[in-house]
Amino acid sequence: MQMNKEWSWVGRFVAVIVVALILAAAIGSMDLFAKTFVISGKLSAAHLVRFLGYSTALGALWMLVSARRWCCSNRAVAGLLCST
């Protein structure tokens, strides 16, 4: 039970990363977004959606790694979040 609590927060971060990547790829490949241009024919909405989705996934990954490092450096404060 202890190990399950320690890793449940990691699962949430992984779920956010996977959903962001899937939605970015799915919405970015729609014809509506591919044919709509934001800046006079140079930047399509599909490119913008993919960029935002992939950036969200990268940001979530960065937060996951940062939280893990903080937990391991502050074991007394972190309590259940850091496993050995």
Image (cartoon, helix red, strand yellow):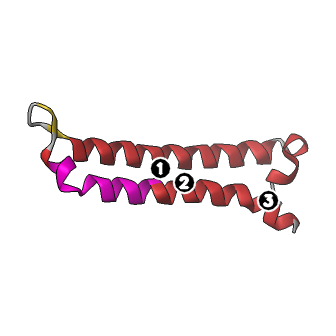
Q: Quadrant of residue 23?
A: bottom left
| 64 left or right of 53 in image | right
Query: Residue at position x 73%, y 60% from top?
Result: 8
Q: Image height check: is 38 above or below 36?
A: above
Residue ranking furthest to the front = 32
Q: Quadrant of the N terminus?
A: bottom right
Q: Image height check: is 41 above or below 81?
A: above
Q: Nearer the viewer, residue 11 or 70?
A: 11
Distance Cα–Cα, label 3 vs label 2:
18 Å
Residue ranking furthest to the top = 39
Q: Percent x, y for residue 30?
A: 23, 56
How crowded is the residue under tag 1: few (<14 C-alpha within 10 Å), some, or many (20+)? many
Q: Nearer the viewer, residue 84 or 7?
A: 7
Distance Cα–Cα, label 1 vs label 3:
22 Å
Q: Percent x, y for residue 36?
A: 15, 42
How crowded is the residue under tag 3: few (<14 C-alpha within 10 Å), some, or many (20+)? some
Query: Residue at position x 79%, y 43% from top?
Result: 73
Q: Which residue is mark 2?
A: 16
Query: Residue at position x 37%, y 42% from top?
Result: 52
Q: Percent x, y for residue 22?
A: 40, 60
State the predominant SS element of the stretch in magenta: helix
> Which portion, as a residue range, is magenta?
20-34
Q: Which mark is residue 6?
A: 3
